[in-house]
Amino acid sequence: MADPAEIEREVAQMAEYWGERREGWRDAAADEFERIVMPACLYGPEQDFRRLQMVNMCFTEWVLFERPLREGKTPLQLYVETPPEGTSESTVDHLRQIDETQLFARFAILDKDPETSRAMLLDVGTDRRYEVCDGALCKNARWRNGTIAERIACVDGLWQVIGQVHLYDRADPDATRVDGPGALHPDDLRAEDMCDAGLFLRLVRDVLGVDGRYAPTLSMVSVEGDAR
């Protein structure tokens, strides 16, 4: 079974590869992201560094896992299809499994064990349960009940977090199941970009956008060195 720390390194290796080649994709992707999300931290008189850091993390995650770069394929898919010279077969296999299974969702927190870093989560959109290796969630005593929005994937039979973004909501899951962060709100139906954006971008807009429904109540905490 793959070590979660090893998977994290392999994902970071893939992200670094594309970061070194950002001239070919970054400007167009950034324009699209900013048009849909309209990050509030970019429009105020003074930039909020922690929110800017969060926006950058969200942008990177969206680009790597969701936004087609060439021929309808994401950077992750292109990396798996044509890995850089010297990339091990095990790394390619792990990243292929991530591509085939990865999903971003809002999960109700049913149970968690800080000793094993395992959490029992329920996708509020599908009611499917997942046992997920998630050290950040399990070790944060403030993150209990409520929901956690994050990206997970199954590698060698183990579900684990493979994104950098953790968005915790202390509200009862049933209270936000239908029209919570990331939902397709009635106002969004008039905007083609929002209908096509998907859960991740809609949720980011809701919590970080200029007109985000939940932006006024967002608070930033440090999780393993990252602002989340």
Image (cartoon, grey):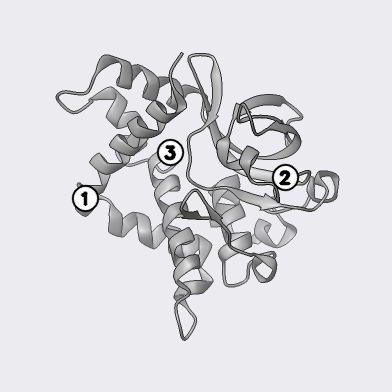
* SS at badge 3: helix
* Marks 1 and 3, how far apart at CA: 17 Å
x then y, percent, for residue 196: 55, 48
Identified at 51% across, 29% down, the residue is: 102
x then y, percent, for residue 45: 47, 86
Side (left or right) of 138 relative to 160: right
Mark 1 vs mark 3: which is more N-terminal? 1
| Label of residue 171 in the image | none
* SS at badge 2: strand
Task: Identify which amino acid the numbered label 3 is placed on.
Answer: Phe
* Marks 2 and 3, how far apart at CA: 22 Å
| Label of residue 24 in the image | 1
x then y, percent, for residue 77: 35, 29
* SS at badge 1: helix
Specify the quadrant of the image occupied by residue 29. Answer: bottom left
Q: Nearer the viewer, residue 159 or 6?
A: 6
Identified at 56% across, 36% down, the residue is: 135
Q: Residue under circle 3?
A: 65
x then y, percent, for residue 180: 74, 52
Query: Do tag 1 and tag 3 residues touch (Cβ < 8 Å)?
Result: no
* Mark 1 crowd level (few <14, some 14–19, many ≥20, 10 Å Cα): few
Specify the quadrant of the image occupied by residue 49. Answer: bottom left
* Mark 2 crowd level (few <14, some 14–19, many ≥20, 10 Å Cα): many
* Marks 2 and 1, how far apart at CA: 36 Å
Identified at 58% across, 60% down, the residue is: 205
Query: Do tag 2 and tag 3 residues touch (Cβ < 8 Å)?
Result: no
Mark 2 vs mark 3: which is more N-terminal? 3
Task: Identify which amino acid the numbered label 2 is placed on.
Answer: Thr
| Label of residue 147 in the image | 2
**Is residue 54 among what the camera can see?**
yes
Q: Looking at the figure, which quarter contains the C terminus?
A: bottom right
Task: Identify which amino acid the numbered label 1 is placed on.
Answer: Gly
